[in-house]
Amino acid sequence: MGFNYRSFDVDDLICNTFGALLGYVLFKYIAKFVTFLKAREQRDIDAL
């Protein structure tokens, strides 16, 4: 066998790490936004 069967590229590692970080940050912002909307909705209901 003249080739390396199990190898990885550093750019794959960087892209996967960046993608995971980006997904985490987006999740946190979306969760905060949803919490804000729910609080606003509850505040509107309480004002009635």
Image (spheres, rainbow, N blue to C red):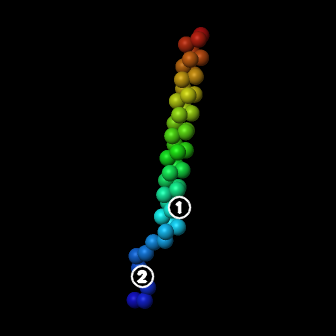
**Label 1 secondary element:** helix
Nearer the N terminus, badge 2 or badge 1?
Answer: 2
Residue 40's image quarter? top right
3 in relation to 36, above or below? below
Asked if the residue under mark 1 is in contact with the one under mark 2, i.e. CB atoms within 8 Å, the reply is no
Image quarter in which the C terminus is found: top right
Q: Position of residue 7 (x, y in %)?
A: 43, 75
* Residue 36 or residue 13, whichever sits in front: 13
Q: Residue drawn 49% across and 71% down? A: 9
Q: Position of residue 41 (x, y in %)?
A: 57, 22
Horizontal and vertical percent position of residue 42: 54, 19
**SS at mark 2?**
loop
Q: Residue at x 43, y 89 (%)?
A: 2
Q: Which mark is residue 5?
A: none
Task: State the quadrant of the N terminus.
Answer: bottom left
Percent of width and height locating residue 12: 51, 66
Q: Amino acid at mark 1?
A: Cys
Q: Residues within 10 Å of mark 1 (few under 14, many from 20)?
A: few
Q: Residue at x 49, y 53 (%)?
A: 20
Give the number of marks. 2
Instruction: Please give the residue where the numbered disc 2 appears in the rendered image.
Output: 4
Circle 2: residue type: Asn
| Residue at the spot of label 1 | 15
Which quarter of the picture shows residue 47?
Answer: top right
